Image (cartoon, helix red, strand yellow):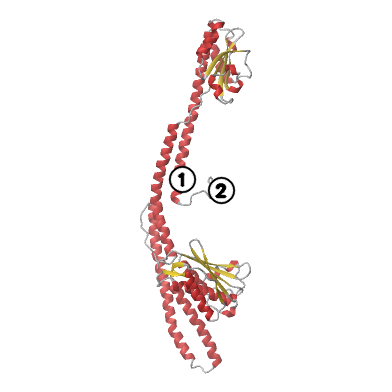
């Protein structure tokens, strides 16, 4: 079972803040522990000092009071009293509860310290932790009336003659928190946080560069070189990333060049075959071969388009709304069932020909497989969503990611007679991600499929 010491939603997400929080928290907790230790030590010392003080004073006052006349006793006890302690004659024995072993030991110490001829010297009573509320008001010190009734007090009851006892009540002092240690703790937290921030900056800055570079590589924007600096672990990660990015880029470029070369090389024999087919006299055979040749030609063009990827065209500022509207108008004039929902200008930095190709693929898929295409643009926080909806059967959730793979066609949900190379959605995904966006498919509640291509407003690298 995993135990969380901090709620997941409150835990900082960045490494720098986490490092500062952990270091500052550790320093704060250790200093609070030290302060608490000193507080408890101070409290124990104060209790011991108060107990010894009360015993010495009780012995002295009781011995003195026993030597003076009854009329002078009150004067002596008033003179010996202070704000925190009070000596008075007590009525009765005042022995309201039994003493503990520690209290018996202290009572014996007082008895042994009294003169040998002191009356009833073995009848001393000590209560070390008496709530001040249990002490009669006439026996309480002056400061007791400013305290809570649960305030701890020491009470001694010492006989002063054969019939009377002297009550001595001392309020236990409450040690203050060690302010000096708390101030030192605050300074330690600030200094450790500053040190943690310095270390975190050295670690996080190379990691941030590494993250940005990885995002560029993932977006097809080449392999930027990451500075190989910082702590050894981070520096080694940067070196490994640079080597990996260079190798991946070389591999992708090699594959792209290979596909492009194959595609170009295929065009020549395809053209020659198309010319030769004109000399085939059997019309039925010629038409069949021509259809096969057209499919092969379409596949070749799709392979070339996928091979080009995000290379070549430079990003520029365009109106996405106008771009999509012009595409929908062209398809509508060709007799395709395409419906465009007007949208206000949507400025965006992109490679317009690629975006137009991606939207065209989505619209053509909707027309072929869903009988019509309803196209609109929705504004989001950081960009726009191009939405293409149809009235087809939709796609099962388990297959919605698989259809973006090359050459994948869902025969069970799409009409096989419509054909297709299986590269259209692959190309759409590559173009969207090359612009820092994404594309996903979702079934509409009322039936049909909705394709959502998200494009950020920010410019993308070439």
Q: Which residue is mark 2?
A: 2
Can residue 114 be seen at all in this image of the molecule?
Answer: no
Q: Position of residue 402 (x, y in %)?
A: 55, 69
Vertical placement of 52 versus 461: above or below?
above
- Mark 2, Cα crowd under 10 Å, few <14 / some 14-19 / many 20+, is few
**Residue placed furthest toward the bottom:** 281
Q: Which residue is mark 1?
A: 21
Q: Earlier in the sequence, mark 1 or mark 2?
A: 2
Label 2 SS: loop
Q: Position of residue 24 (x, y in %)?
A: 44, 42
Can residue 286 be seen at all in this image of the molecule?
Answer: yes
The picture quadrant where one finds residue 155 is top right
Eye-nearest disc, 1 or 2:
1
Label 1 SS: helix
The picture quadrant where one finds residue 389 is bottom right
For residue 43, which numbered disc appears in the image? Answer: none
Q: Position of residue 430 (x, y in %)?
A: 47, 69
Q: Position of residue 27 (x, y in %)?
A: 44, 40
Vertical placement of 455 versus 162: above or below?
below
Vertical placement of 372 versus 147: above or below?
below
Q: Nearer the viewer, residue 27 or 434?
A: 434
In the image, taking residue 143 as reference, residue 220 lies left or right, namely left
Q: Residue at x 54, y 19 (%)?
A: 142
Q: Nearer the viewer, residue 93 or 147?
A: 147
């Amino acid at each position: 079972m995993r135990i969380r010491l901090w709620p997941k939603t409150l835990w900082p997400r960045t490494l720098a803040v986490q490092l500062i929080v952990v270091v500052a928290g550790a320093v704060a907790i250790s200093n609070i522990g030290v302060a608490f230790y000193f507080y408890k030590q101070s409290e124990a010392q104060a209790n011991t000092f108060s107990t010894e003080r009360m015993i010495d004073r009780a012995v002295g006052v009781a011995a003195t009071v026993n030597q003076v006349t009854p009329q002078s006793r009150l004067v002596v006890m008033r003179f010996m009293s202070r704000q925190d302690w009070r000596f008075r004659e007590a009525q009765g024995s005042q022995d309201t509860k039994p003493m503990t072993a520690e209290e018996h030991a202290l009572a014996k110490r007082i008895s042994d310290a009294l003169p040998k001829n002191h009356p009833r010297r073995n009848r001393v009573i000590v209560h070390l932790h008496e709530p001040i509320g249990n002490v009669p008001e006439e026996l309480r010190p002056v400061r007791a009336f400013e305290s809570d009734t649960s305030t701890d007090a020491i009470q001694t009851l010492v006989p002063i003659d054969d019939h009377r006892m002297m009550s001595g009540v001392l309020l236990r002092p409450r040690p203050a928190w060690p302010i000096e240690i708390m101030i030192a703790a605050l300074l330690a937290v600030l200094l450790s946080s500053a040190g943690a921030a310095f270390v975190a900056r050295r670690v996080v800055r190379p990691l941030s560069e590494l993250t940005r570079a990885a995002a560029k590589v993932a977006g097809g924007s080449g392999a930027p070189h990451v500075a190989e600096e910082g702590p050894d672990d981070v520096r080694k990660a940067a070196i490994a990333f640079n080597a990996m990015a260079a190798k991946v880029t070389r591999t992708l470029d090699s594959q792209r060049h290979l596909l492009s070369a194959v595609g170009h090389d295929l065009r020549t024999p395809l053209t020659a075959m198309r010319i030769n087919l004109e000399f085939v006299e059997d019309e039925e055979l010629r038409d069949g071969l021509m259809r096969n040749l057209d499919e092969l030609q379409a596949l070749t063009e799709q392979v070339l388009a996928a091979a080009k990827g995000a290379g070549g065209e430079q990003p520029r500022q365009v109106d996405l709304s106008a771009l999509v509207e012009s595409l929908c108008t062209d398809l509508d004039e060709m007799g395709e069932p395409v419906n465009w929902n007007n949208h206000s200008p949507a400025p965006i930095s992109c490679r317009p020909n690629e975006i137009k190709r991606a939207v065209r693929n989505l619209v053509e898929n909707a027309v072929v497989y869903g009988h019509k295409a309803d196209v609109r643009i929705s504004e989001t926080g950081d960009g726009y969503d191009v939405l293409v909806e149809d009235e087809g059967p939709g796609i099962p959730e388990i297959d919605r990611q698989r259809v973006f793979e090359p050459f994948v066609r869902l025969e069970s949900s799409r009409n096989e007679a419509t054909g297709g190379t299986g590269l259209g959605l692959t190309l759409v995904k590559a173009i969207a991600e090359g612009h820092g966006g994404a594309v996903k498919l979702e079934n509409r509640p009322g039936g049909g499929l909705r394709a959502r291509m998200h494009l950020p407003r920010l410019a993308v690298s070439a």
